[in-house]
Image: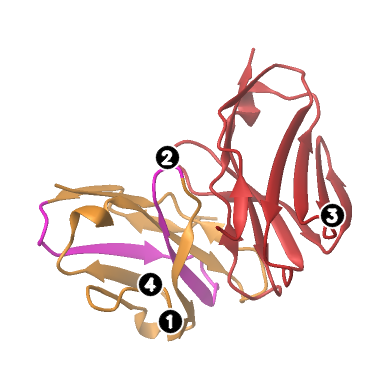
Chain colours: A orange, B red
Amino acid sequence: EAGVVQSPRYKIIEKKQPVAFWCNPISGHNTLYWYLQNLGQGPELLIRYENEEAVDDSQLPKDRFSAERLKGVDSTLKIQPAELGDSAVYLCASSFQKNTEAFFGQGTRLTVV
Amino acid sequence: QKEVEQDPGPLSVPEGAIVSLNCTYSNSAFQYFMWYRQYSRKGPELLMYTYSSGNKEDGRFTAQVDKSSKYISLFIRDSQPSDSATYLCAGSKTSYDKVIFGPGTSLSVIP
């Protein structure tokens, strides 16, 4: 069974440019998470979806970040415009439901120059 | 003060050693505690999951939670080079609440 698939694996962009990350969760998983992981730190939750509904987006910087999960399956996370401080690994995770084990993808490593 | 704290290491041990990884937390509402393992350039994977205080054993791994002192430990017996990774401890208030991660401890097991 395929795990959580994220793309791209690596992305280098200039500051002020837009960037988008894509996540395909494990089939049948209703809950999807986006996390931010800075170097030497643990993941920090940005947003959690239950099916297509964003139920916890309190940590998402809404002035520049947006996310969507159309049809309750795949999800995209967008940053516009990117800033130097956005350089980090963006992790997607999914779980069957909100109180079951979450499985992480390999992440997208973003470098803003 | 971060809600979950860990010594970042790096911790280096010889193969076969017993490893002790420790973590403290400040949120007394935490009831669920987790240890994740994260290999380089990979996402974290759940290693151990415990509820409230007590011990839980799974193969070579033992997790201990002491809620009175807000202290979490992970013991690895007969450590192997394949155990070399970053170990993240985490806590949450309920089984479906936001999980708060520590910064991780980097472990190297030397053959």
Q: Which mark is residue B66?
A: 3
Q: Is residue B43 magenta?
A: no
Residue B94's disc is: none
Mark 4 sits on what residue? Answer: A74
Q: For this rendering, which residue is in front, B30 or A76?
A: B30
SS class, disc 3: strand
- The residue lying furthest to the top in this view is B111
Question: Is the Cβ of the residue at disc 3 closer than 8 Å to that at disc 4?
Answer: no
Choose mark 3 or mark 4, whichever is in front: 3
x and y, in percent, of residue A19 in the image = 19, 62
Q: Secondary structure at mark 1?
A: helix
**Which residue is pictured at 42% across the width and 79% down the height?**
A57
Nearer the camera: disc 2 or disc 4? 2
The residue shown at (30%, 69%) is: A77
CA gap between label 3 and label 2 equals: 32 Å
Estimate the spatial distance between the alpha carbons at disc 4 and disc 1, rounded to whole Å.
7 Å
- Range of residues picked out in magenta: A14-40
Secondary structure found at label 4 = loop
Q: Which residue carries the number 1 mark?
A: A72
| Image side of residue B16 versus residue A50, left or right | right
- Please identify, in this view, whether the residue under mark 3 or under mark 2 is nearer the observer: 3
